[in-house]
């Protein structure tokens, strides 16, 4: 659930023009700091964002899924769904 929630937040944070959701996260400014470029260079002439925020959201979910699973398995051992009686 944690990986899904983070991926969903990152995905919706970039906005979705088809449904009218405005961008909430400043991906252009974050990317500009990482590669030392002007934030305006991350926008196309039509105003659409060129930063691959959808890909970042997918990779964040793919990385977080096994990480959170391993951490939670160490903290609380997995239990079987049903008890098997062995005689």
Image: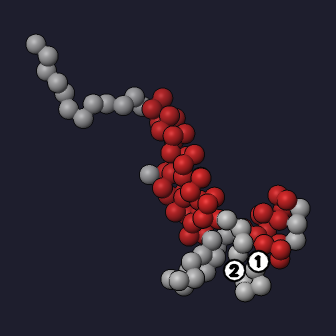
Residue 50 to residue 33: above or below? below
Residue labelled with disc 1 = 43
Residue sticking out furthest to the top: 87
Query: Is residue 75 visible in this depiction of the protein?
Result: no
Crowding at dot 2, Cα within 10 Å, few <14 / some 14-19 / many 20+, comes out as: few
Q: Real-space Cα distance between discs 2 and 1? A: 6 Å
Q: Residue at x 60, y 69 (%)?
A: 13
Residue 22 to residue 10: above or below? below
Q: Is residue 51 left or right of residue 85?
A: right
Q: Is residue 24 left or right of residue 43?
A: left
Q: Quadrant of residue 14?
A: bottom right
Instruction: Report helix, strand or loop for mark 1.
Output: loop
For the residue pair 75 and 19, the one nearer the viewer reads as 19
Question: What is the image's colouring?
Answer: secondary structure
Q: Position of residue 53 (x, y in %)?
A: 65, 65
For the residue pair 65 and 42, the one nearer the viewer reads as 42
Are circles 2 and 1 on residues that touch, CB within 8 Å? yes
Q: Is residue 11 left or right of residue 86?
A: right
Residue labelled with disc 2 = 48
Counting labels gives: 2
Instruction: Report helix, strand or loop for mark 2.
Output: loop
């Amino acid at each position: 659930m944690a990986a899904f929630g983070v991926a969903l937040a990152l995905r919706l944070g970039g906005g979705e023009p088809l449904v009218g959701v405005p961008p909430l996260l400043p991906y252009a400014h974050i990317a500009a700091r990482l590669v030392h470029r002007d934030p305006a260079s991350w926008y196309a002439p039509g105003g659409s964002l060129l930063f691959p925020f959808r890909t970042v959201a997918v990779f964040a979910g793919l990385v977080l899924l096994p990480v959170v699973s391993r951490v939670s398995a160490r903290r609380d051992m997995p239990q079987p769904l049903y008890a098997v009686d062995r005689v």
